[in-house]
Image (cartoon, rainbow, N blue to C red):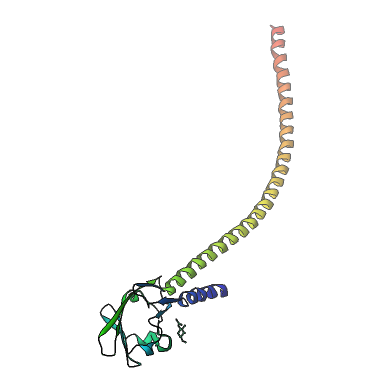
Amino acid sequence: MEATVGLLFLLIGVSYGVETFCDARQDGAQCLGSWGGTVFVKLMDQASGAPRMDWMKGATLILRWRNNEIVANTIMSRSEFIPNNGTFRINNLRNSDSGKYTLNLFDSEGKEKRTRNLQLFVEGQSPIRVGAISALVFYLILLLVCIIILCVRSKKQKCKENLNADLIYVDVRVVQQQGRKSVKQNMEEEVEYSQIKTAGRNDVMPKSKTTLK
Ligand SMILES: *[C@@H]1O[C@H](CO)[C@@H](O)[C@H](O)[C@H]1NC(C)=O
C-alpha cells in the first residue's frame, strides 16, 4: 500500500518536475516542454537593454515590456519574467501552450527592430492520468499475484487433504478386498467342492444308470 502511494507520488512528481531550457535568442528556435512541467525561455541576455518588447503567441500578446517594466503578462498566474537574465518561465505547461511564438523588439522610437520566432512543443499526457493508470495496473498485478499465491496455497492444502483421504480410502479398499478375497476364496472353494461333488454324482449316476440298464 505504502509502496503504491509512493510510486504514485513519484510518477506525479517526475511528470510535474520536468524542467526544460530553451534559447530563443536566435530566430527559428525549437523548444520542448513537458505536460505539467516548466519551460525556461531565454528571450534575451537581459531585459534592461531592450527598451520595448512584445512576446506574442500567434496574435495573442503574452508579455509586454516597456521602459524596464513589465506592462502586461497575460499568463501571469503560471509564469514569470525574470528581467535580470531575460528569461520567461512558464509553469504547468499544457497542450495549448504548443505553437509559434514571436518576439518583437522595438527601438526606443517604437519602430520594430527585430523579430524572432520560436516553436514550442508540449509533449506528454496528463501526469495524473498516467499516475492513475500506473497505480491501477500495479494494483491489478498485485491482486493477480495474491490470487495466484492463495490458489497455490489452497491447492497444496487440498492436495494434502486429498492425499490423506486417498490413503484412508486405499486402506479401506485393501481391507475390504482382503475381506472379499477370503470370502471369495471360501466361496470358490465351496463352489469347486460342490462342483466336484455334483460332478462326481453326475459321473457316477449315468454310469450307475448304464450299469443298471
Ligand atoms: C534566470 O534567473 C532565474 C532566477 O534567478 C533562474 O531561476 C533561472 O534559471 C535563470 N535562467 C537562465 C537561463 O539563466
- Residue 150's place in the image compared with 51, above or below, is above
- Residue drawn at x 29%, y 87% is 107
- Residue 28's place in the image compared with 173, above or below, is below
- Residue drawn at x 57%, y 59% is 148
- Residue drawn at x 70%, y 49% is 167
In the picture, measured across the screen, residue 58 lies left or right of residue 129, that is left
Seen from the viewer's position, the closer of residues 194 and 22 is 22
- Residue drawn at x 34%, y 85% is 75
- Residue 163's place in the image compared with 184, above or below, is below
Residue 2 drawn at (x, y percent): 57, 75
Residue 157 drawn at (x, y percent): 65, 57
Q: In which quadrant of the rendered view does residue 206 lie?
A: top right
In the picture, measured across the screen, residue 173 lies left or right of residue 11, that is right
Quadrant placement of the C terminus: top right
Residue 154 drawn at (x, y percent): 61, 59
Seen from the viewer's position, the closer of residues 118 and 139 is 118
In the picture, measured across the screen, residue 85 lies left or right of residue 179, that is left
Residue 22 drawn at (x, y percent): 41, 76
- Residue 147's place in the image compared with 212, above or below, is below
Seen from the viewer's position, the closer of residues 109 and 76 is 109
Quadrant placement of the N terminus: bottom right
In the picture, measured across the screen, residue 153 lies left or right of residue 123, that is right
Report the number of numbered marks. 0
